[in-house]
Amino acid sequence: MADHNDADSFVLYRYHPSLAAAAIFVVLFALTTGLHVFQTFRKRSWFMTPFIIGGLFEFIGYIGRIMSSNDRYALSPYIMQTLLLLLGPALYAASIYMILGRLILLTGGERYSFVRRTWLTKIFVGGDVISFLMQGAGGGIMSSGASGMKTGEKIIIGGLFVQILFFGLFFVTAIMFQMRGKEYLTSLGSSVPWRKHLFALYATSILILVRSVFRVIEYIQGNAGYLLRHEVFLYVFDAALMLAVMVILNVSHPGDIAILLKGQRKEQPQEFETLRDDSAERGVASMGDR
């Protein structure tokens, strides 16, 4: 079995995984994911389903690290934590992309988005699917053994670059929407809480981008790299950031947008009926004048 200090050999862990750190994040991800499940069902915001699955990936991934703390040479828990912690944020991204489309619909400001709302979700979620599949394929190849390490790492790096590219474009799209529609959005006042949801998108996007850049550097350095030799970086630049993403959307839950949209749909038929009645009354009045 390769020595964990041997830079020329592939080893699962180059440190002893911390039981305490993994256990803390298992509990924290369980709490925030459980709250997301409750909020999603309560507000019937089913577009948050990928986000919840991402939370489950994080939760189970850190269970894998607990298992690895007992036996750092066991392959199954290593594969479990590697794949799930790698892929979880891609699932977060799918829901985050859908939030912006709903926010644009809620504000009625589609003319201020340089990407049509009907295409926005398709483009960004499509890119996210490509990123997810590439990272999953790369992780699968890596798990096949040391012979597939280099190939798997390259595919994962490619998938992470795709994720960074699309998230960067998404971030620019959100900022441009706010800048182009600044006066209009401000005129909506407090009736539409667009600010808190848009700023939540900014915050979560930045956190996932930072995490993705960290992961790219980690995989470029390779199995013997500095980042993979020090467990603390995983918790600072991945675990803590992804937990923050989940908590931010607990506090500013996108289900509120879904509720407001449903309210708008209910009001529209009533407004139509009122307009039709007013029109009928004017018609009767004009006939009487004759």
Image (cartoon, rainbow, N blue to C red):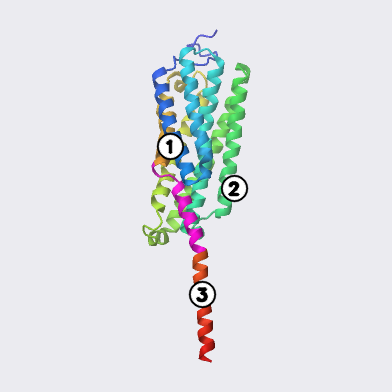
Residue in the image at 56% along x and 16% along y: 75
Going by the image, does 10 lie left or right of 29?
Answer: right
Quarter of the image for residue 32 reads top left
Q: Position of residue 4 (x, y in %)?
A: 49, 11
Residue in the image at 49% along x and 67% along y: 271
Q: Secondary structure at mark 1?
A: helix
Of the numbered discs 2 and 1, the one sitting upstream in the chain is 1
- Residue depth check, mark 2 versus mark 1: number of the one nearer the observer: 1
Residue found at the very far bottom of the displayed protein? 290
- Residue depth check, mark 3 versus mark 2: number of the one nearer the observer: 3
Question: What residue is pinned by disc 3?
Answer: 277
Question: What residue is pinned by disc 2?
Answer: 122
User: How far separated are the C-alphas under marks 1 and 3?
Assistant: 45 Å
Residue 159's disc number: none
Q: Is residue 163 visible?
A: yes
Question: What residue is pinned by disc 1?
Answer: 35
Going by the image, does 135 lie left or right of 262?
Answer: right
Residue found at the very far left of the displayed protein? 190
Q: Quadrant of the N terminus?
A: top right
Going by the numbered disc 2, the residue's amino acid type is Lys
Q: Position of residue 146 (x, y in %)?
A: 60, 16
Of the numbered discs 3 and 2, the one sitting upstream in the chain is 2
Q: Secondary structure at mark 2?
A: helix
Instruction: Judge the density around disc 2: few (<14), some (14-19), many (≥20) Cα neighbours within 10 Å.
Output: few
User: How far separated are the C-alphas under marks 3 and 2?
Assistant: 40 Å
Instruction: Judge the density around disc 1: few (<14), some (14-19), many (≥20) Cα neighbours within 10 Å.
Output: some
Magenta residues, start to end: 251-268
Residue in the image at 50% along x and 81% along y: 282
Task: Count the labels in the image.
Answer: 3
